[in-house]
Amino acid sequence: MTTSAVVGLVRRLAATVPAPSDDRSARDALRHVASELSSPQVARDLVALTIAVFLALELLSRLVYHLPDRLFRARSVPVRGKHLDELSGKDRTFIGINKCMTGLFVYCYFGYLWSVRKTGDGDRGHGHDHGPSLAEHRRCCSGGSGIWATDELSLTNTILPVPLLFFVYDFFYTLLHWALHVKAIYAYVHKHHHHQKAPSRANIDAVNVHPLEFFLGEFNHVLALRLVVRGIPFVGFKGTDVSWLGAALFIALGGILAGLNHTRHDVVVRAPSPIRDGEGKRRSWTVFDSKHHDVHHRIPQSNYGQYTVAWDRIFGTFREYDGRDRVNPAYQLDPATGKTIGSSKRD
């Protein structure tokens, strides 16, 4: 596909999103989008976008699976639960459906950011009236904007919003994940993901979930983006500008971290802490540890967070990885096949 073809595709899809100055209800906005998407050309564009995202996921999964070991000599997390050596037809169907669904998610995710973009006068347009005071304006129109102009990219709208997006996302994901473990619901949705006790295939194992769960988890990113841009009045947060590059970094890093959570790679990301220990050495905070999600697959009533366990620590559901836990030699994986040692002989 040529550059001009890609630009044309992006422009046509952008045209389906209501303009930020439109004064219309959510129902009217959805009707507008549905009407635009009924065009055969736009339908073809969505299919092209889905194929591109599908291929990107394949590449991402391979990179996450191979690079930590080859580039960083990452240590391997011992297998303590039974590994799912063979994917069933149901597994492959769910994986395929979810990968295809990602195209729609990308359209909605960036579509939302486009819908709150700045207009030519540097602000989202008004399609409504409010009182003349500044206080009334802020109550009505507080919040940031989607930044799309390259010359407007900055540290404050590209890098700084990313940690906030992760923090907001994981608050809702932790609650969702906990709810999926409620006994009355678990067997119908989330149980499918947990028949893999020792994830190893990176993003393939990550997306091997019930399509309903995948839909809720993916569109939780849109909710997080909306709250970070428009604000969370309940906690006094007024919202902030988020650039297209910052939004892209959020989902790209999220894809990498979700993949690492479903490998045997021991990957830990730490941030320096202002706190010092008794010897005067600066401590560090664990921002991400792939072993925490490995604990969840073995002990499901713990570590519900997707990218961080910050909310698990707050809610009291955090469980630290214990390297002293028993390791069953019969459960270990053959590096050559990625399957349980001796499984090929038994087959």
Image (cartoon, rainbow, N blue to C red):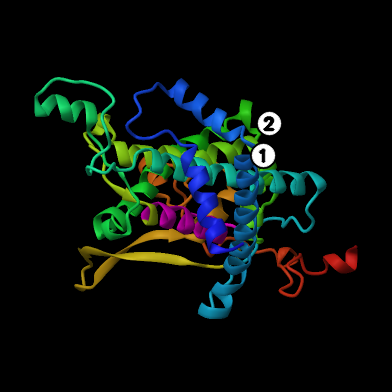
Residue 315 seen in render? no
Q: Which residue is mark 2?
A: 188
The quadrant holding residue 328 is bottom right
Q: Which residues are magenta?
A: 246-262
**Amino acid type, mark 2:** Tyr
Mark 1 is surrounded, within 10 Å at the Cα level, by few (under 14), some (14 to 19) or many (20 or more) other residues, namely many
Residue at point 72%, 68% (across, down): 333
In the figure, is residue 246 to the left or right of 289? left
- The answer to whether marks 1 and 2 mark residues whose Cβ atoms lie closer than 8 Å is yes
Residue at point 50%, 35% (across, down): 176
Residue 168, relative to residue 345: is it above or below? above
As helix, strand or loop, the secondary structure at mark 1 comes to: loop
In the figure, is residue 92 to the left or right of 204? right
Q: Which residue is mark 1?
A: 210
The verdict on residue 253 being magenta is yes
Residue 40 image offset from top left, x and y in percent: 65, 38
Label the magenta part by its dominant secondary structure. helix
The verdict on residue 324 being magenta is no
Residue 283 image offset from top left, x and y in percent: 27, 67
**Amino acid type, mark 1:** His
